[in-house]
Amino acid sequence: MDATLWVLGSAGWMPKAGQETSCFLLEAQGQLVMLDAGTGVANLGLVADVLRRHDRISILLSHYHLDHLVGLMYLKRFAADKRVDVYGPGQPVYPKTTEEYVGDMLQDALYSSGPSGFAREVHYHDYGGRDFSVGELPVAVRAQVHSSPSFELRVGDLVTYATDTSFDAASWEDCPSSRLLLHECWQLGAGDPRHTSIEALAAGLPRSRFGRVLLIHHNPSWDAGERSEAGRTAARHGMELARDGMEISL
Ligand SMILES: [Zn+2]
Ligand SMILES: [Zn+2]
């Protein structure tokens, strides 16, 4: 099964020159799947030919923090003629549904098109922390540790997407393999317990289970020296820092 993934947003929290916030696009089995909808949605202009091939986009949300959600309001520029399905954690792991949270963010006073106005039709779904599927693509869901409930999403054997999570090596010992792992890398060493460090990944990630490992959700506070250090440590352990605009064949 051939598949392609595009990195549209490799930063966490806020954009930085050349780096938008969390957003990845996967084309596989005739489906177009977006992983999170941060400001990287603005980079859909880089893949206009891909968009033309699809009438439908399925958006899978790891959680609702704004750096993963705010790009929904940019979709009107790219998806006005498409059906969009938004899958979020929702109930029962959150008190409200995905439709309600997006409705809060895109309420009339804040966004004139409203929560159903950024595409031809919009459908909301709660995966509720359980496995689900998008067409023929199975999506395995695993709870993570973060400041709000966040979920690792594994699409078939293609991509494991793990962002906004602390890293616990023990929970990765028997993890299923994937062609690509997208894992957050927020800090160089121990620090914020809601996030992952390059040091922890280098020490505890079972690298051989993944064809390729791209580190994502970079901290926009990094200076050039910290970014280079993260890149060097990643390279020593067979990993690499993601860059917006990367196209990965799987
Ligand atoms: Zn985030
Ligand atoms: Zn978060």
Image: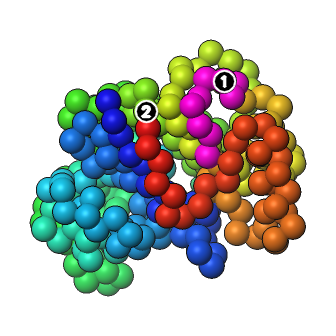
Pick whichever, 180 or 162, lies toward us.
Answer: 180
**Kind of residue at badge 2:** Leu
**x 68%, y 18%: residue:** 173
Regarding residue 212, the answer to whether it shows in the image is yes
Image quadrant for the N terminus? top left
Q: Position of residue 79 (x, y in %)?
A: 22, 67
Question: Which span of residues is magenta-colored?
Answer: 206-214
Q: Is residue 227 above or below residue 33?
A: below
Q: Is 97 displayed left or right of 185 in the figure?
A: left
Q: Please tell me whether residue 74 belongs to the stretch shown in magenta.
A: no
Measure the alpha-carbon separation of dots 1 and 2.
15 Å
Q: Position of residue 99 (x, y in %)?
A: 29, 55
**Kind of residue at badge 1:** Ser
Q: Is 102 displayed left or right of 212 in the figure?
A: left
Q: Position of residue 65 (x, y in %)?
A: 52, 59
Regarding residue 71, the answer to whether it shows in the image is no
Pick whichever, 116 or 184, lies toward us.
Answer: 184
Q: Position of residue 10 (x, y in %)?
A: 58, 60
Q: Which residue in the protein does label 2 denote?
A: 158
Q: Which residue in the protein does label 1 denote?
A: 208
**x 73%, y 21%: residue:** 170
Q: In terms of image quadrants, where is residue 19?
A: bottom right
Q: Is 93 displayed left or right of 237 in the figure?
A: left
Density class for disc 1 (Cα within 10 Å; few <14, some 14-19, many ≥20) is: few
Q: Is residue 36 above or below residue 171?
A: below
Q: Is residue 92 above or below residue 19?
A: above
Ranked by sequence position, the earlier of labels 1 and 2 is: 2
**Does the closest atom of ligand 1 sit within 8 Å of the Cβ of label 2?**
no
